[in-house]
Amino acid sequence: MKRLCLALPLCASLAFGSACAAEPAIANIVDSHGDTIGTASFAPHNNGTLITVDVKLPEGTHAIHIHENGTCAAPDFKTAGGHYNPQGHKHGAHAGDLPNLFVESTGHIKAEIFSTQLQLTGKGALPHGAIIIHEKADDYATDPTGNAGARIACAVIKP
Ligand SMILES: [Cu+2]
Ligand SMILES: [Zn+2]
């Protein structure tokens, strides 16, 4: 059944079962030149969203957040707005705050991030935010940005 799902992306609408319905939406991650450097996928679960990123980045530690607007206008990605923060909290407790990514000298990282704060459908959902990756690490303290520096990559969230 799994193979059938991969071969038929529309199978969810054919009610073959929950395995099909959980097939994630995949978005391109673009850099400041607008070039594609990887992918981000978004799979809804009962208690949140599983985000999977597979991307080439400079070696080092990089903040990754959910930002409030689903637009990725290069080169600075300012159009994505601030961190997703529907409850009006300070940084460190924003719904869009996520753990840093650690990229080794290969310049490639694949990571799964499960967020209980992000719902793609239903009440209070954020169906079209953006994933932003920054040049520096998030310090989990400085409000409202985490002192993470420039926005170096972006992907529009797809429900
Ligand atoms: Cu950010
Ligand atoms: Zn934040």
Image (spheres, rainbow, N blue to C red):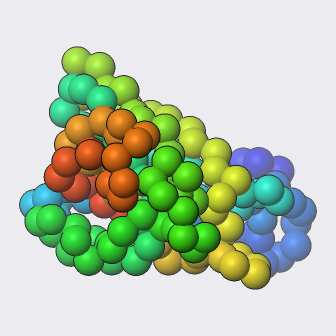
Image quadrant occupied by the C terminus: bottom right
Relative height, residue 140 to residue 90 (above, below):
above
* Numbered marks: total: 0
* Residue 58 against residue 4 in the figure, above or below: above
Residue 76 lies, in percent from the top left, at 15, 65
Location of residue 48 (image quadrant):
bottom right
* Relative to 113, 35 lies left or right: left
Q: Position of residue 43 (x, y in %)?
A: 65, 57
Q: Nearer the viewer, residue 145 or 131?
A: 145
- Residue at the image point whose x is 39% and y is 34% from the top: 101
Residue 94 visible? The answer is yes
Q: Residue at x 36, y 27 (%)?
A: 102
Question: Which residue is located at x 36 percent, y 36 percent?
Answer: 139
Q: Is residue 79 above or below residue 105?
A: below
The residue located at (22%, 71%) in the rendering is: 78
Residue 41 seen from this side: no
* Front residue of this view, candidates 108 and 127: 127
In the image as oriented, which residue stretches furthest toward the top? Answer: 105
Image coordinates of residue 56 in percent, x first then y, are: 27, 38
Q: Is residue 58 above or below residue 98?
A: above
- What is the x, y in percent for residue 65? 42, 53
Left of 6 or right of it: where is 92? left
